[in-house]
Image: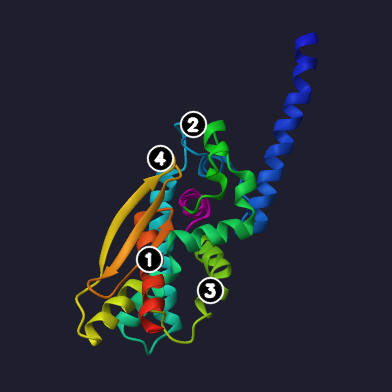
Amino acid sequence: MGDGGALEPDRGRLLSGSDDLAGWIAETLGHRPADLADYERALTHGSRSDANYERLEFLGDRVLGLVMAEWLYERFPGEPEGALSKRYNALVTGAVCADVARGLGVPARLRLGKQARDDGASDSDNVLGDVMEALLGALYRDAGLEAARAAIRRLWAARLTADASAPQHPKSALQEWAAAHQRKPPLYEIVDRSGPGHAPRFTVKATIPKLAEALAEGGSKQEAETAAARALLQMVRSR
């Protein structure tokens, strides 16, 4: 009898935590789950458990890609494939997914090991972007494509209509600038890599040979290259 009574407060806290998570998912993703297992896993970093978000991120990445491609195809019926690709690439980056995650309050709900938390993983674009995709994977498994589509269209709505014309990726824009000015194509070089495995920082140098160069950092090689290309493009355009 004594042991049974001692367990009640813990059980109450667990139920309260589950209700809180279910309510948050219902509010942010538009669907109240009956089973929280996938959502809990989607919020769990590898530093905390082997049962982490990585597999769900793999699935959610594909769900986001399909829904976004379908949406752009419908929303911009007069645009060619190249313009649609530019829009697509600007909307599904890890940085955008991380920004969406921050807006939903994901950092406060991440399940991290102590070292990862101390290293700042809760504000890492890499981590938050992956977790956002994992949550979409969990939603797809739980409620199907319609629910995932509705959540993505709601969460990305403002971003989809932010640009009247298709945005051009900084690396593509820099490449075109170089060609138009009879310059050699831009070169990209990783000059530094720091930070722990789950939250790396890359420093990349972008160079147009015999003209100019720029350094930039990012949470991934791609992110750093994009930032360096953007900085170099601004530099050469201002000359």
- Amino acid type of the residue tagged 2 in the rendering: Ser
> Disc 4 marks which residue?
197
Q: Residues within 10 Å of mark 2 (few under 14, many from 20)?
A: few
Q: In the image, which disc is placed on residue 190? A: none
Say left or right for 146 vs 110: left
Which mark is in front, 2 or 4?
4
Highlighted range, magenta: 126-144
Residue 173 screen position, x and y as percent: 33, 79
- Whole-angstrom CA distance, mark 1 to mark 2, is 35 Å
> Disc 1 marks which residue?
228
* Secondary structure found at label 3: helix
- Whole-angstrom CA distance, mark 3 to mark 2, is 33 Å
Say left or right for 162 vs 216: right
Quadrant location, the N terminus: top right
- Amino acid type of the residue tagged 4 in the rendering: Gly
Which mark is in front, 3 or 4?
4
Q: Is residue 2 visible?
A: yes
- Whole-angstrom CA distance, mark 3 to mark 1, is 23 Å
* Secondary structure found at label 2: loop
Mark 4 vs 1, N-terminal side: 4
Mark 2 vs 4, N-terminal side: 2
